Structures are given as C-alpha cells and as structure tokens.
Image (cartoon, rainbow, N blue to C red):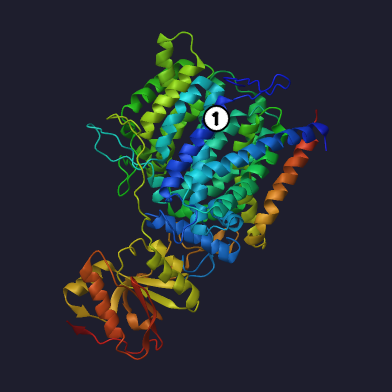
Amino acid sequence: MKKEIFDLIKKEVLYFIYLLLLFIVLFEIAFYNDSFITILRSVFSIFWLFIIPGYFGMLYWHDKIDFVQRTLIGSAVAAGLIGTISYYLGLAGLNLKYHVFILPPLIIILGFLLANMKKK
Amino acid sequence: MYWFTSDILFTPKKVVQIKLDFEKIVLAVFFGILLFIGPGNLFGHKIMHDFPYGYYASDPFQHQIRAEAIKDAGNFKYEAFYISRGFDNIVGRYPPLLYHIAVIFSYSSGLEVYDSIYFVVMFFAIIAALVMYFIIRDFNKRVALISLPITILMISHPVNTTSLFFPLNSQFSTGFIFGHWPSMLAQFFLVAFTWCVMKLDLEKSYIFISIILISILLTHTSEAVFAGIFLVVLVLSKWLNKNLSRRDLKKIGIFLAISFIAVAYYIIIFKYTWAGSQPYTFSVDPIWNGNPGFYIFGFGILLIFIIIGIFASLTQLKNIHVSLVFGFSMLLAGFMNYIGFQLRSFQIRFFWPIYLSVFFGFGIYFVLRLIIKNWNMTYSLALFAVFSVLILGIIKIPGIAHYSNYPNSAGLMDQYHWESLKWISGNTEKKSKILFFYGDIYSQDALLRNTKRSHYQVDTDEFVKSLQEKKIERNYVSEIPGDTGGGTMERTGLFSFHDPSQDKPNSYFFGPHDICGFDYLVFDKVSNTLVLAQYNLLIANDLLKKDFIKIAFENQVVVILKNTNIGADCIEERNF
C-alpha cells in the first residue's frame, strides 16, 4: 500500500467515526419511536452498503475532492454499482441474498486498487 | 476551507485547537431537519413497521411487491406470475436498480422490503439536496447557503401557499406517497450526474460519470433523456463560450460508450417493452389529470426570487456555471408536458425545489449585492436562517410556500388487511385462485399482489348494480388485475418478444366469473359504505351454507372462505 493512501485512510477513519456518531444521533432523533437496535442496524447498513464502499470508490480522487463530497458522491456511486452489479449477478444465477456480503467488499477492493495505481 | 474558526485554549501547558467548521455544522443540522420532517414524519418516526406504512396509492405497492418478488426469486429475470396476471416467464421489464438496492438493504438492515424500499428513496432524495448544495457551492458558496432552505419544499405535503391567482393544489410529496419512487431515485442520480459532469476535468472522471449514468438508465430510463438534455445544453454553452476542448468531447464519448455497453442487456428489453408500448406522441397537457402535481406558482412569493435568479443568470452567460445550466435544463424539462412528455415532466417537478434552488439563492444574492458591496458570509448564514424559519413554517407568512406535515395516518394499509394478505401468501397452495369481493382499499389493486397468488377482484360498478337489483349471483363480473405497463412480454429470442396476453380474449381478463371456481373468497366485513360490507356478508353467509365451504381465516375486518369442491354449486342465486 502506498504510504500516502495509508496515511490518508488513517486520518479519515476518524471522520468516519464522527460521521457514524452523527448518523446515530440524527436517526435516533428522527425515528425516536424505534428501538435503538433498529436504528443502529439501519445506520450500519447505510455505512456498509453506501458510505464505506463509496468512500473507497472515490479514493482515487482524494487529492482533488474533499472528504465530505467524496462521501456524498461516493454513496451515489456505491448505490449505483451495487444495484447494477447485483442485477447482472442475479441474472447470472447468484442469489441476491449473497450480494450483501460480496458487493461492498468488492467495491472497497476495486476502489482501493484504483487509488493505489495512481501515479504521483 | 473554514468560514469561522474558533481556537480554544484549554490549559496553559497544552494547547488544544478545536476548529469549528460552521459549514459542516450547518449541513449536518440541515440533514437532521430533513430527516426529521421527511421520512421521520411520514413514517411516524419509525423505520420499522408491522405493515406497509405511508403508502397512499397503488403504485407504492406495485414497487414494494416487485422488490419482494425479486427477493423471493433471488434475481429479476422474470416478473412474478401474480404481478403478470397469472402468466409465467414474463421478462423483468422494469428498470431494476431501485428494487435491487431495496432488497440488499433489506437483507443488511433486517427491515422488511416494504420499509427498506421507501427508506432508500427518501434517504437519497435528502442526499440530493446536499449534493446540489455542493454543485452551487462550486459556483458561489455565498449563493449555495442561501439556496439551501428552499430544498425543504421537496418533502413538503402539500406546499402551503395562499395563492389567489393559482387555485391548483401544489404537492411535491406525491412523488413519495403516490409511489413515483423509481423517478425520485433516478433524479437523485441526475443531481449526482451533474456534480460528476462538473468534475469532468478530473483524471479518469469518466469512471464515476459512467457509473452514475448507468444508474440513471437502470433506475428510471426517462430521466436519462433529461440528463441528455442537460448534457447537450452544457456542451452547447461550452462550445459557444469557446470552452469546449477535444479532451472534454473525448471523455464524454468514453462515458457514453461505457454506459450504453453496460446497459445494453436491459436496453433491449426496454426497447421491446416500454418503448414499444409508450411511444412518444405530441400532446399539450397543462394539468396532470388525476394527480396532485406541482405547478410553478406553488412557490408563491418565493417564485419572485427564482425569476430574478433566472434573469440574473443571463448576466453569467459568458462562462456560465454548470449549476445554472442544470437549473435551466430542468426548468425546461419540467415544462415539457407542453410538448408530449406528459407525466415524465410532471415527475421532474417533484425535484424543482432542488433544481431551481440555484436561481432562488442567486436571485436573492444578486439583489442584495446591489445594496451591500462588501458581502460577508454572515449575511448568507443569516439569510439561510431566515428562509429556513419561513420555509419550515415556523413563522407563516401568507403567500410564502412553506413545509406542511404529512397526514397523521398509516396510509391505505392497516394491520388487519395486511394480516389477511400475509395469511394467503403463507398458507394457501401456490396455484390457488383467489377472488376478492368489495373492499374499500382494493381499488388500489397492486396491494392485492401481496397474496402472491393468482387473484381476481369483483368489478365495483357491477357489484353495486347487483346490490341495487337485490340479487345474490353465482357469476360476478370480475377482473384479473395486474401490471400491464410496458406489456407482459415473454422473451423468445435476443431481439424477439411475445405478449401471451394477446392470445387470450378480453373476457378472460374482464367479464363474468363463476365464484364457485375459486379456491378462496375474500370478504371485507367493514366498509365506509356500510351497505357494501353487509352485501359482502350476505354472500359469505350464503356460501357458508354449503358444507364444502369453510372459514379459513378471520379477523375483525376480513373473512376468507375456502372452497374444497371447486366447480360444485356453491351458492343459490336469489333475490333478497
């Protein structure tokens, strides 16, 4: 792993923790009639499916786009990729129930590899 | 970049700097407000429900049950038979992306599909407002902050304006509660597409632009037409301003090529289903008949700022920013109902508070800049606060469009009907035929697909006629409801499709049906029209006189009878 990428991820992990806490608090307020477990599971799902894969999907452009915009657009990119790949994987015969375990790590790995390939 | 920075000294020995980034704080608070007044209010401040909650029409059920069917099948190769009027092997013709995301989110979160699909749509609509903020911020960060409050209207139900001049009810929430969900999600991707195109200069930008364009095409294909309009207007404006480089054109060519290759499989299906059954025809439709849509005067006094913003944007024509091009394109797209785009244009208007927010912010900024020469970011923050208060409706000023809460109701569905539908799907044989007698909610027939069985429903007009004639009959005019949008097509080859419903006479789908030929008969015991419920029970009680008909399920609202001797004389025709 390139040191630059490693340092960046190390630094931005902290932002993720802030963002996760923010989401939990805001969801707890907006959906105050729901159990904490439901809130927690929903927020973790948003992070697992959209925010974390999106972050890695946009990592290649880390020097041009700030963390917030990478995360926002990354979530769109991740949602689009997950929906699209899932459609074709389903047609190819892989049941959707497995996609939740396969697709986010796949996008994370691809995004990470792309960022690592970037020339200085 | 920080607007305001606060350095706090904690101890004499150790200096701890806390940088308060007010922009991020404002965005976080705004996101929280949208979450609270949008999905929070609509969902009764719960994410997880015991039955589909906040569904106000047939279409939300249409999308919910399709996602549910995809979850059951594990893929979207075929449409389920209970969606396709009993036909098997009907190709999955709806753009698949929303359904796949909803199913995967359901697996991940543990939510039922009816909750996960609705949540995904609303969540990304809120994210769209934030993405638009960053698009405008790239133009002018002072304008971006002033623009933000008007996006609140996107989740309002309905928009409250006291307009003496325009009596039409304006409602944005139709997009959510009436189930224009694929369009709503596609419009989120459309906003993301604009952000991506704004970053065209970045190295390998075609990667993320392709992904977003593919997402639009696979979520609600008609939004790709509007993305195309925006792209053409942008390229033209760049060309006229001599800003269009060969490199730009090359990148556009690459992302268009990647996108069309990636969606080729689906586009073939689209061409032989939707494109064939709903071809473009010129028409002028000033009103969206039968639907509470949004009309530009619904903005009320806020429209004045939007119009000023539009005129002010003309001063920017040289080197016009993407956000303004996008605003103009979507304004145009929202008026294409006058040239045959019908509901597709009305759907675009659901997102007008986001698309046109740039004009709103720029209009106010443009006017105030004539007075205030040295603009301070604090002024933008103050305007953001003032308009947030007004548009949230905390202070209501007549004529200013402001947020209105959703009805304090679960919508069409209730726990008793849901219980009965789930009972049918979980306890009857897969090939069972179900007949629904009159029920207040059954006119929104997509909800009946939750039986996951072949189902029929009596025609209300004919049923009322029989009641008026005081007749108990063996044959009631009934229909096979189902989703025929785009045609019910079987795929017979790579480029050949066949609609098996064309092989059946019309009477197969709508006509007198022998009620003794059904495995299960569903009666509502309560109704807003009492006499219809009484008529239902009269028929049910006559059926129960036969020993081969038994009550299979019953709760306070619904009774389901099972016929164990199909075709036998199950009811005595009589007058009462």
Q: Is residue B454 visible?
A: yes
- Indicate left or right for B543 with B350 as reference: left
| Residue at image point 72% right, 45% down | A108
Residue B91's image quarter? bottom right
| Residue at image point 60% right, 61% down | B75
- Indicate left or right for B241 with B58 as reference: right
Residue B305 lies, in percent from the top left, at: 37, 23
Residue A118's image quarter? top right
User: Closest to the observer: B494 or A20?
Assistant: A20
Residue B131's image quarter? top right
Number of callouts in the render? 1
Q: Is residue B185 visible?
A: no
- Indicate left or right for B7 with B515 as reference: right
Residue B42 lies, in percent from the top left, at: 41, 48
Quarter of the image that includes the N terminus of chain B: top right
Q: Is residue B462 above or below residue B267?
A: below
Quarter of the image that includes the C terminus of chain B: bottom left
Residue at the far bottom in the pictured view: B547
Q: Is residue B215 above or below residue B571?
A: above
Q: Is residue B422 above or below residue B328?
A: below
| Residue at image point 67% right, 28% down | B202
Residue B380 lies, in percent from the top left, at: 47, 20
The chain that hosts pointer 1 is: B
Q: Which residue is mark 1?
A: B25
Residue B17 lies, in percent from the top left, at: 67, 23
Q: Is residue B455 above or below residue B7?
A: below
| Residue at image point 37% right, 75% down | B435
Q: Secondary structure at mark 1?
A: helix
User: Closest to the observer: B402 or A90?
Assistant: B402
Query: How dense is the environment of label 1, judged by Cα within 10 Å: few (below 14), some, or many (20 and up)?
Result: few
Amino acid type of the residue tagged 1 in the rendering? Ile
Residue at the far front in the pictured view: B12
